[in-house]
Image (cartoon, rainbow, N blue to C red):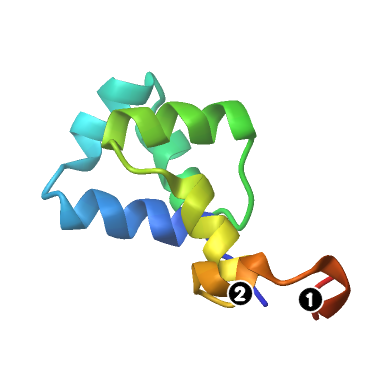
């Protein structure tokens, strides 16, 4: 399964009606660095923590849900039952 964290971040930013300029200022990154984030399939956990706080959205839960098949129920299965392990 391909998890695209940058796409999730960009979608949440749009959902909240926030501008890229606002986002740049909040996370103290340049315009080009923000667009690099939006294009990224992976991200540093400290940066993701900062972005989660700024957008008041837990992207770690989003990632976990996608890994577990998009439902929290699937995450309660024993590790031997998980196809992605």
> Which quadrant is the N terminus positioned in?
bottom right
Q: Nearer the viewer, residue 57 or 79?
A: 79
Tell me whether the residue at label 1 lies in contact with that at label 2, contact meaning CB atoms closer than 8 angstroms.
yes
Query: Tag 1: Cα neighbours inside 10 Å, few (<14), some, or many (≥20)?
Result: some
Kindly tell me whether residue 39 is visible in this rendering: no
The image shows residue 78 at horizontal and vertical percentages of 79, 69
> Which quadrant is the C terminus positioned in?
bottom right
Q: Could you tell me which residue is drawn at 53 percent across and 65 percent down? A: 65
Q: Nearer the viewer, residue 31 or 55?
A: 55
Q: Is residue 81 above or below residue 57?
A: below
Kindly tell me whether residue 71 is visible in this rendering: yes
The disc at residue 74 is: 2
The image shows residue 79 at horizontal and vertical percentages of 83, 67
Give the secondary structure at mark 2: helix
Q: Is residue 77 rendered to the left or right of residue 26? A: right
Give the secondary structure at mark 1: loop
Quarter location, residue 80: bottom right
The image shows residue 24 at horizontal and vertical percentages of 31, 29
Q: Is residue 25 above or below residue 17?
A: above
Q: Is residue 74 above or below residue 65?
A: below
Quarter location, residue 2: bottom right
Q: Which residue is mark 1?
A: 82
Q: Nearer the viewer, residue 85 or 31?
A: 85
In space, the residues marked 1 and 2 are separated at their CA atoms by: 8 Å
Query: Tag 2: Cα neighbours inside 10 Å, few (<14), some, or many (≥20)?
Result: some
Q: Is residue 27 above or below residue 31?
A: above
Q: Nearer the viewer, residue 7 or 62?
A: 62
Q: Could you tell me which residue is drawn at 36 percent across and 28 percent down? A: 53
């Amino acid at each position: 399964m391909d998890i695209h964290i940058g796409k999730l971040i960009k979608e949440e930013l749009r959902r909240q009606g926030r501008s890229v300029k606002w986002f740049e200022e909040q996370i103290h990154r340049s315009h080009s660095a923000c667009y690099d984030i939006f294009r990224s399939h992976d991200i540093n956990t400290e940066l993701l923590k900062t972005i989660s706080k700024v957008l008041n959205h837990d992207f770690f839960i989003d990632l976990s849900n996608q890994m577990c098949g998009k439902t929290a129920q699937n995450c309660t299965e024993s590790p031997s039952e998980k196809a992605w392990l």
